[in-house]
Image (tube, rainbow, N blue to C red):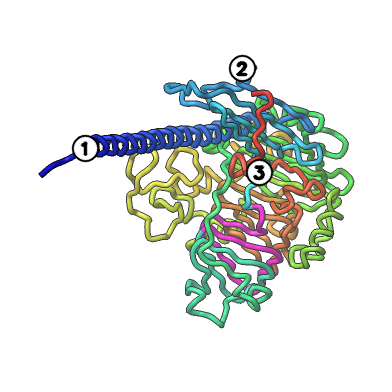
């Protein structure tokens, strides 16, 4: 066999070319993969920076919200805080033990629109990490009125309307079951955190024979809401914010009797009590007695703080909130001197008609009472009051208020009572601190918590005297009261005896425990001016400074186009 050397050289050249081509292709693939990997890494880092800048901007927004909560901005003002200027602390935006070297800066502005209520602010926050910038904006309401005030009747326990002489013109809500007996009239919505019942029988077992009449009785599908989320009530354990507001302008915040101002923001605790010791189990705080007439009404403006008990009756006028550190003793009817026309039952009207009523009633009287103790209406020293409000079976004050066995839901008589549960501090017990005072409260004690004793009278400024001695409470108070105009809130019990005919609440009643006993018709007429749906409309806002539930409410939240100006 013979072969040619030229042919073999040609074959070797072809093989070399093939190897070089393959090697080149491999190099291109490797380079492309490296480039792709590098781009992927850059994109990954970019996404991380993108996310980081969002969370830092969000932290800046939270910081500014806290700043606004601590001190409300001046109406119409704009304030800018910046890490570059050192007015925005970096440690509040980044983890102080792991500061990010890629962080460039953050800036936040707080704007209070003059056309809005002064507790509404718009916060805009920007943050930059490497070359990524995010800008966020939110409208927030500082210390928004609690939504418990959206109802004419709100009970933090078992709601109960027993009797066909009860009429409700608005919404009512309970943070547990709501029981109806005797076909009361309900012209509004019913909310219960658990069940709506008729004589303790669930509504589902009664339908279509409902235990109430009126609008809710004719349209239970749309008007009756079971299993509603419970609403957290405000807590009045600390009056610091309300006291600061009251003292900020003592000429605008106060209480007048006729033309004489008798409270300048806060009733002073420098008051020296008359002989008699302290007021039951309460700290010796200064209280107030005041009675208004048509000729000399009680005028309330802005935020007013009374550290001790308040005894009040008669004609009132103005717009504002009385914060009461002890009990509110409603000795007799409280009526507005210049109230709106409640006979229209605004909450039962069409929305446009209701809004028109709100707009037309903006300058009329609107007074709120925020009470740390209890609301006690009528002559608490009378046998009728003691029998009907204190000793009444199951729901009288003698049988409620004990926190030692409440269970995790804080509602007496529910399945979790007597079952230990884990507390935030890591302990286990059946105790639930319903009022947040840090102590295990027992059931209400008549002499310590309710009775108008000479000891209690001694700390009440202006309490009437005869020959230097306080007069009997029965000479001041009456169970025949007929009308209570106002927004009434208590951290504890609302126990009121009303023997008038008819009896009417024009406003709101909110409590943790309730024993309202009416001998004749009782009407609950909701005052639509306090409903939270109006809180964002400057044309429909009356800022009463009502107790707040959440410290801050976010009305809107959005992301804007990145804005790096000032970073």
The residue tagged with tag 1: helix, strand or loop? helix
For the C terminus, the image quarter is top right
- Name which of mark 2 and mark 1 comes first in the sequence: 1
Residue extending furthest toward the top: 85
Q: Is residue 226 above or below residue 266?
A: below
Mark yes or no: residue 284 visible. no
The percent coordinates of residue 105 (x first, y second) are 59, 23
The residue tagged with tag 2: helix, strand or loop? loop
Q: In this view, does 529 lie above or below 352?
A: above
Q: Nearer the viewer, residue 460 or 411?
A: 411
The percent coordinates of residue 130 (x first, y second) are 54, 26
**Residue designated by label 1:** 8
Which range of residues does the magenta coloring cover? Answer: 149-175
Q: Residue at x 49, y 47 (%)?
A: 445
Q: Which residue is drawn at 63% across and 48% down?
A: 146
For the N terminus, the image quarter is top left
């Amino acid at each position: 066999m013979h072969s040619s050397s030229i042919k073999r050289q040609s074959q070797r050249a072809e093989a070399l070319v093939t190897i070089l081509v393959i090697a080149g292709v491999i190099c291109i693939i490797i380079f492309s993969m490296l480039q792709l990997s590098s781009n992927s890494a850059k994109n990954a880092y970019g996404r991380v920076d993108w996310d980081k800048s969002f969370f830092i901007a969000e932290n800046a927004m939270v910081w500014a919200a806290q700043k606004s909560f601590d001190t409300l901005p001046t109406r119409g003002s704009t304030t800018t805080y910046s890490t570059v200027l050192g007015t925005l602390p970096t440690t509040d935006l980044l983890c102080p033990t792991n500061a990010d070297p890629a962080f460039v800066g953050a800036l936040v502005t707080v704007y209070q629109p003059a056309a809005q209520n002064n507790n509404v602010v718009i916060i805009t926050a920007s943050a930059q990490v490497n070359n990524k910038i995010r800008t966020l904006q939110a409208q927030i309401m500082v210390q928004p009125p609690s939504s418990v005030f959206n109802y004419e009747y709100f009970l933090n326990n078992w709601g109960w309307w027993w009797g066909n002489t009860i009429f409700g013109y608005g919404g009512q809500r309970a943070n547990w079951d709501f029981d109806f007996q005797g076909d009361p009239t309900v012209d509004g919505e019913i909310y219960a955190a658990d069940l709506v019942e008729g004589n303790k029988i669930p509504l589902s077992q009664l339908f279509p024979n409902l235990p109430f009449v009126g609008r809710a009785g004719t349209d239970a599908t749309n008007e009756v809401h079971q299993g509603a989320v419970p609403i957290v009530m405000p807590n009045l354990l600390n009056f610091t914010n309300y006291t600061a507001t009251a003292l900020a302008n003592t000429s605008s915040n106060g209480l007048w009797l006729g033309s004489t101002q008798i409270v300048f923001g806060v009733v002073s605790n420098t008051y020296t009590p008359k002989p008699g010791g302290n007021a039951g189990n309460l700290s010796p705080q200064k209280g107030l007695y005041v009675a208004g007439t048509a000729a000399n009404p009680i005028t309330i403006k802005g935020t007013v703080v009374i550290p001790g008990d308040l005894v009040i009756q008669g004609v009132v006028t103005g717009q504002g909130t009385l914060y009461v550190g002890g009990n509110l003793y409603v000795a007799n009817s409280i009526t507005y001197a210049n109230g709106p026309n409640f006979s229209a039952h605004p909450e039962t009207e069409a929305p446009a008609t209701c809004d028109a009523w709100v707009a037309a009633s903006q300058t009329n009287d609107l007074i709120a009472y925020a009470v740390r103790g209890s609301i006690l209406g009528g002559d608490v020293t009378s046998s009728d009051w003691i029998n009907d409000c204190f000793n009444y079976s199951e729901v009288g004050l003698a049988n409620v208020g004990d926190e030692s066995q409440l269970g995790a839901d804080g509602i007496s008589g529910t399945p979790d009572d007597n079952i230990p549960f884990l507390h935030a501090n890591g302990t286990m017990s059946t105790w639930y601190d319903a009022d947040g005072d840090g102590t295990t409260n027992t059931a209400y004690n008549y002499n310590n918590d309710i009775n108008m004793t000479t000891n209690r009278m001694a700390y009440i400024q202006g309490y009437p005297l005869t020959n230097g001695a306080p007069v009997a409470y029965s000479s001041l108070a009456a169970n025949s009261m007929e009308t209570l105009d106002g927004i009434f809130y208590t951290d504890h019990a609302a126990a009121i005896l009303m023997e008038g005919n008819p009896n009417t609440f024009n406003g709101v009643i909110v409590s943790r425990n309730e024993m309202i006993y009416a001998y004749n018709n009782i009407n609950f007429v909701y005052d639509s001016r306090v409903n939270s749906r109006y809180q964002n409309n400057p044309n429909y806002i009356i800022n009463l400074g009502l107790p707040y539930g959440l410290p801050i409410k976010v009305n809107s939240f959005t992301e804007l186009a990145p804005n790096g100006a000032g970073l």
